[in-house]
Amino acid sequence: MSNKPEAPEKGKDFVRQIIDKDLENGKYGDRVVTRFPPEPNGYLHIGHAKSICLNFGIARDYDGQCNLRFDDTNPVKEDTEYVDSIKEDVRWLGFDWGENQFYASDYFERFYAVAELFIRAGKAYVDDLSAEEIREYRGTLKEPGKESPYRDRPVEENLDLFRRMKDGEFGDGERVLRAKIDMASPNVVLRDPTLYRIKHADHHRTGDAWCIYPMYDFAHCLSDYFEGITHSICTLEFENNRPLYDWVLDTLIECIGSETCGENETEVFGGGATTQERPYQYEFARLNISGTVLSKRKLIQLVQEGHVDGWDDPRMPTISGFRRRGYTPESIRDFCDRIGVAKADSMVEYALLEHCVRQDLNERAPRYLGVLDPVRLIIENYPEDGEDVFEMPLHPEDESVGTRKVPFGRELIIDRADFMEDAPKKYFRLTPGKEVRLRFAYYVTCTGCDKDENGIITAVRCTYDPATRGGWSDDGRKVKGTIHWVSAKHAAKAEVRLYERLFSEDRPGNPGEGRTFTDCLNPDSKEVRTECFVEPALADIEPGTHFQFERTGYFIADAKDHTPGEKLVFNRTATLRDSWAKIAKKG
């Protein structure tokens, strides 16, 4: 199956309807340019996958362009490690930005030039109020704010102070540059928002070249403008900030067309676009999934406090975590396609995500035999030095996948749950006197078991019917039970990591009074079994290989710890059926 994304065959969402209308009206000519603009201050999570699929999917559907742009305006939290991980995640999901990779830091000089232009036009001023005082002056949702005593500084004084801020004369928080909009605006965001702040910190790309950095709301819309973005698509939490997005761009265009802007500056500011042609912002509902948290702050806390084994822990809702757990890019794209793009927030069941990966792996994953809770099975009437080799299909519904050879002997290993000494009536596995089928091998009849001094079963005993080779009987008798097995002589030993959901509650992000989201952690989210046995064909598979253990679940050879022929480490991607009900009940 190809990893190349294909256009969804369904009705168009509201964003695509907007684009259709814009194209029909010739708003941007025939251009459609979107962007995916992550901040490189953490790893991407499944919520970002929705935005990636939407923005790159639109570019694909309209033969347009999607830029990958890193909004790196906060040097304190950003790192090249996050940049590299983001690029890896986007590529893994199946999307390519080609030559269209940008950074907000590419435009630091231009941002600064725009800020000076705004000062000259009387649209921005340097404020000496502290952060606490600015909050106090801002007012509330019911009361208007108060104007700063520094709001009406002369233009030349503002320019001088701003340039001295840039030259490093002042300490962090000593001064800021604010937009001059409306302190009585009903939208608090428009009450003279901060455009620049002082941060004496090295930037991951520009080093110590700058000690003032633009705020996200200032840099983001300007980056869109400089890159010729047509549709700036973001999540609903930015809806209240849209008027500021519009104000910055409309003010810039107004200034470019005024005497304030010199002729030689037009190109620096990206002049030429009209108010109609500039980018506009559209918001869609962010992804909310039951049974997990997608707050970057909370994910960072999980990592830093050691609740998980890093950003790519298979229990984490990060894209790298899903990848290491064994989720496929096709399954995540299918999930994003199924949930659609809407304007209103809603909660998506985690079970849908699991369903998508099961659907995908059911079609693609080869089948193997593995025993995760082993006990010996001794076939008493099988020759002690005897040996069989059975050819088994790698996929029950796709012959083209091929077959593999599985050795068989007198002593096998089966799952402990497949034997019960005193079984209930509808138990169809091994119990004294009952006949079952060994998968693709023989019919066997249980004769008893061996126990140690503590009463623990150490071996199950049985006899086999040589006439049932291949697991079928010519005399028409049928058995209801089929169990999996591996040859004790030939099996490879493996470590298997069984993952469940990280949280034991459906809404861990809102656990109730007096509790935090870490109180909702599932203590049974990871179980490591070191005494597992698998058929020998699995000994040489490469890291990142998907497969199904028959009757058990879908697994992947761990990307970090699995070494073919040496140390076999398999992560469970998903059970064959959803076990959420069991976990929720326990929680």
Image (tube, grey):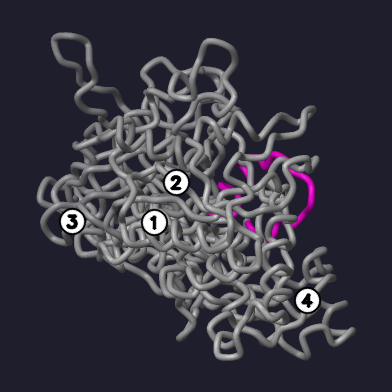
Q: Mark 1 — residue? A: 165
Label 1, label 2: how far apart the Cα atoms are: 8 Å
Q: Residues within 10 Å of mark 3 (few under 14, many from 20)?
A: few
Residue 94 or residue 406, whichever sits in front: 94
- Which residue corresponds to mark 2? 175
Rounded to the nearest angstrom, the CA distance separating label 2 from label 4 is 32 Å
> What element does badge 3 sit on?
strand
**Percent coordinates x, y for residue 435 in the rendering:** 43, 35
Q: Nearer the viewer, residue 108 or 16?
A: 108
- The one nearer the camera, 572 or 75, is 75
Q: Which mark is residue 275?
A: 4
Is there any visible trace of residue 199 in the rendered image? yes
Along the horizontal axis of the image, is 214 left or right of 199?
Answer: right
In terms of sequence position, does the residue under pointer 1 or pointer 4 come before the other? 1
Residue 358 visible in this rendered orientation of the protein:
no
Disc 1 vs disc 2: Cβ atoms closer than 8 Å? yes
Q: Nearer the viewer, mark 1 or mark 4?
A: 1
Judged by depth in the image, the label closer to the viewer, 3 or 2, is 2
Q: Compare marks 3 and 2 and give the one earlier in the sequence.
A: 2
**Magenta residues, start to end:** 336-357
Q: Residues under labels 3 and 1: Cα distance? A: 82 Å
Identify residue type, mark 4.
Answer: Thr
Q: Which of pointers 1 and 2 lies earlier in the amino acid sequence?
A: 1
Q: Nearer the viewer, mark 3 or mark 4?
A: 4
* Label 4: element kind: loop
Q: Secondary structure at mark 2?
A: loop
User: Would you identify the image quadrant in which residue 448 lies?
Assistant: top left
Magenta residue check for 487: no
Q: Return the residue at label 3.
A: 387
Residue sitting at x 22%, y 48% = 487
Mark 1: give few (<14), some (14-19) or many (20+) Cα within 10 Å. many
